Amino acid sequence: MENGGSKGDIPEDANAHCPGTQSEEAGKADSCAGCPNQQICATAPKGPDPDLVAIAERMATVKHKILVLSGKGGVGKSTFSAQLSFALAEKDLQVGLLDIDICGPSIPKMLGLEGQDIHQSNLGWSPIYVESNLGVMSIGFMLPNPDDAVIWRGPRKNGLIKQFLKDVDWGEIDYLVVDAPPGTSDEHISIVQYLQATEVDGAIIVTTPQQVSLIDVRKEINFCKKVGVPVLGVVENMSGLRQPFSDLKFMKPGAAGETDATEWAMNYIKENAPDLLSVVACSEVFDSSRGGAEAMCIEMGVPFLGKVPMDPQLCKAAEEGRSCFVDQRCSASAPALKSIIDKLIKTTPGDGV
């Protein structure tokens, strides 16, 4: 759709040739006729948004701001955001994690903070703290019932994102990790617009190896290039299944269905091939025959940060709201995540590390 406004001031459901919400013609131009936003645009104040000054002042105490994006849903973006935040906090850094996935806030669950409420002070909204150096903010803390659907149009979503940026009192922190919903819609335009004067370090883009996901990741990369957000790198998540052989389950098919044969199989292996119990089973879950995310990064000229295997223990850590780095259970995924995060820290210069 062709529009006449500048980037970031055109509603998602605007008519063709929209002049932009900040234009003097907003709501009055011929192209505005029949637009669902016509009355709002015609009566809304024009000119620079005074809240952007308040956001810039609030963000002045944040050294590094990193967006975590994905083109496709279900690729493990929020899991990566959560584990990135845990890892940074475990390096004795001051960390904030902001969840702007308004309709699908999963961060409270992944940080073990379900059921918590936001508190206000004279300094603003207080984040919910996992540890003294890891604070979290999400709409999930504002829902009376976690099963409640958030059925909001763009302007209301944008208003809450602005309020998060303007009113949350993070204090002096080294990193603010922003977990965004999949795609390139209202929330993404808003977060970029609101943070445009605050020096965003860049975006990490999470994908899975197959073309179905990479097609949308290419759009996400092009979005970042168009709005001027540096791409810090791409992470290929679920890059093959890796699981200790001793954790596998075995099923025996039969006429009446499948029966659990794990105990029989493990006893057989212990007696006849005990060395198998110390190996790691690997399997390609998604088709990566065309080179996966690494080949795409070369093609599009953006950094490739690395691969994280599909690890059932990492999924369990996310379900239980805990870090995958505190013990040896996530032996398949934690080293890969640590390598990626160490590489990422080196790309965000400054005295925050």
Image (cartoon, grey):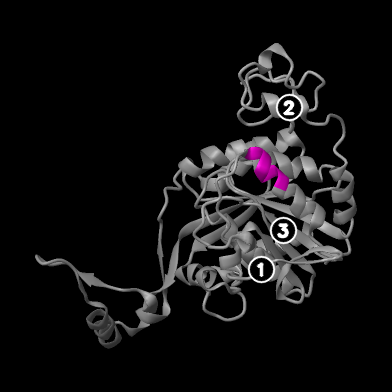
Residue annotated with mark 2:
41
Which residue is found at the position 74% from the left and 20% from the top?
Answer: 19
Q: Looking at numbered disc 1 in the image, what kind of residue is underneath it?
A: Asp
In this view, the residue in front, 162 or 227, is 162
Asked if one can make out residue 98 in the rendered structure from this viewpoint, the answer is yes
Q: Looking at numbered disc 3 in the image, what kind of residue is underneath it?
A: Val
Q: CA distance from mark 3 to mark 1?
A: 20 Å
Quarter of the image with the N terminus in it? top right
Q: Sequence-wise, which precedes: disc 3 or disc 1?
A: 1
Q: Which residues are magenta?
A: 154-159
Residue annotated with mark 1:
117
From this view, report whether residue 98 is shown above or below residue 41.
below
Queried whether the magenta region covers residue 24, the answer comes back as: no
User: Which element carries disc 2, helix, strand or loop?
Assistant: helix
Queried whether the magenta region covers residue 155, the answer comes back as: yes
Where does residue 318 sit, x and y in percent of width and height?
54, 68
Q: Residues within 10 Å of mark 3 (few under 14, many from 20)?
A: many
Instruction: Give the main secondary structure of the magenta stretch.
Output: helix
Mark 2 or 3: the one toward you: 2
Where does residue 288 sit, x and y in percent of width and height?
46, 48
Residue annotated with mark 3:
177
